[in-house]
């Protein structure tokens, strides 16, 4: 998967990787990108779980929960959709899934990351030898994670979630899940890269930007 990001507006991501448990894996990395661009109808307080514009309630993931309990049932309970996702991932192709999560969870996560702006630190890298550079803001220190971010990490790291990822991708995902939060501000960028590292087998990006405008950059 070749990734390129150059943003003219603010973007919030929660992203990471699933790793193979075997130490000698030679598998390449595939990526699944999901977003909730249209989730603004339900504004949820990420602390209390209360909703200011609907009766829907958001409950934090519990240890051992599967990600399937928080995905959009209109998509992930459709056999054809699951088949198509499997087909693309198992062919080593990237997959983009719009509105993948339940809107209450997406709104809570968006509000949580937005309120943690002070915890994001600049990550800048440029090296001519590998023709790669990046400039964006991240939270890599797990000590700075909020309760919801920790609960989300536990969800992505649960055995049930990793079994689901393995079933979709055909890759071994029994190792540790590595997370990060990313905030791309005006001028932030990442040049093309493969996302391969160590025993990483599946990479994911949960896009949480609101009001996204698709533009062509020449």
Image: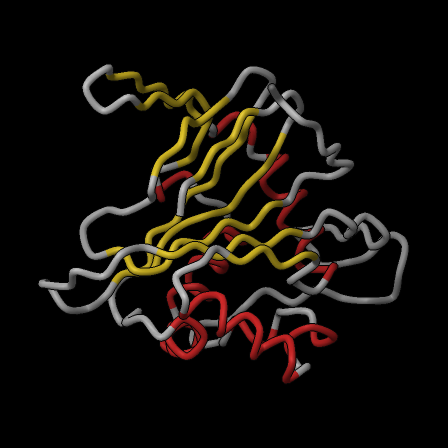
Quarter location, residue 130: top left
Image vertical order of residue 113 relative to residue 201, above or below: above
Image vertical order of residue 91 relative to residue 53, above or below: below
Query: Which residue is at a point 63% across and 69% down the rendered structure image?
Result: 71
Query: Which residue is at a point 45% across and 54% down the rendered structure image?
Result: 204
Image vertical order of residue 102 relative to residue 196, above or below: below
Residue pushed farthest right? 53
Q: Which residue is nearer to you in this view: 9 or 102?
A: 9
Relative image position of residue 216 (x, y in whole percent): 67, 26
Quarter location, residue 96: bottom right
Quarter location, residue 180: top left
* Colour scheme shown: secondary structure
Relative image position of residue 192 (x, y in whole percent): 40, 32
Residue pushed farthest left? 24
Q: Which residue is nearer to you in this view: 15 or 108?
A: 15
Query: Which residue is at a point 38% across and 65% down the rendered structure image?
Result: 157
Instruction: Name the image quarter holding the C terminus.
Output: top right
Relative image position of residue 112 (x, y in whole percent): 61, 43
Relative image position of residue 64 (x, y in whole percent): 43, 76
On screen, residue 22 versus residue 176, left or right, reads: left
Query: Which residue is at a point 54% across and 68% down the rendered structure image?
Result: 61
On screen, residue 53 versus residue 201, left or right, reads: right
């Amino acid at each position: 998967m070749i990734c390129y990001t150059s943003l003219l507006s603010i973007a919030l991501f929660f992203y990471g990787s699933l790793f193979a448990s075997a130490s000698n894996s030679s598998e390449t990395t595939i990526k699944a990108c999901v977003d909730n661009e249209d989730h603004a109808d339900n504004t949820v307080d990420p602390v209390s779980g209360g909703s200011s514009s609907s009766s829907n309630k958001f409950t934090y993931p519990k240890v051992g929960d599967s990600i399937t309990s928080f995905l959009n049932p209109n998509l992930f309970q459709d056999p054809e959709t699951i088949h198509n996702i499997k087909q693309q991932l198992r062919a080593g192709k990237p997959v983009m899934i719009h509105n993948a999560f339940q809107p209450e969870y997406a709104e809570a996560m968006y509000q949580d990351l937005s309120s943690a702006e002070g915890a994001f630190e600049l990550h800048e890298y440029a090296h001519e030898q590998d023709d790669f550079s990046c400039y964006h803001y991240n939270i890599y220190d797990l000590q700075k994670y909020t309760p919801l971010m920790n609960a989300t990490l536990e969800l992505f790291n649960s055995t049930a979630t990793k079994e689901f990822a393995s079933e979709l991708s055909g890759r071994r995902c029994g190792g540790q899940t590595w997370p990060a939060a990313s905030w791309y501000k005006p001028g932030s960028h990442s040049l093309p890269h493969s996302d391969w590292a160590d025993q990483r087998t599946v990479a994911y990006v949960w896009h949480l930007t609101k009001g996204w405008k698709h533009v062509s950059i020449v």
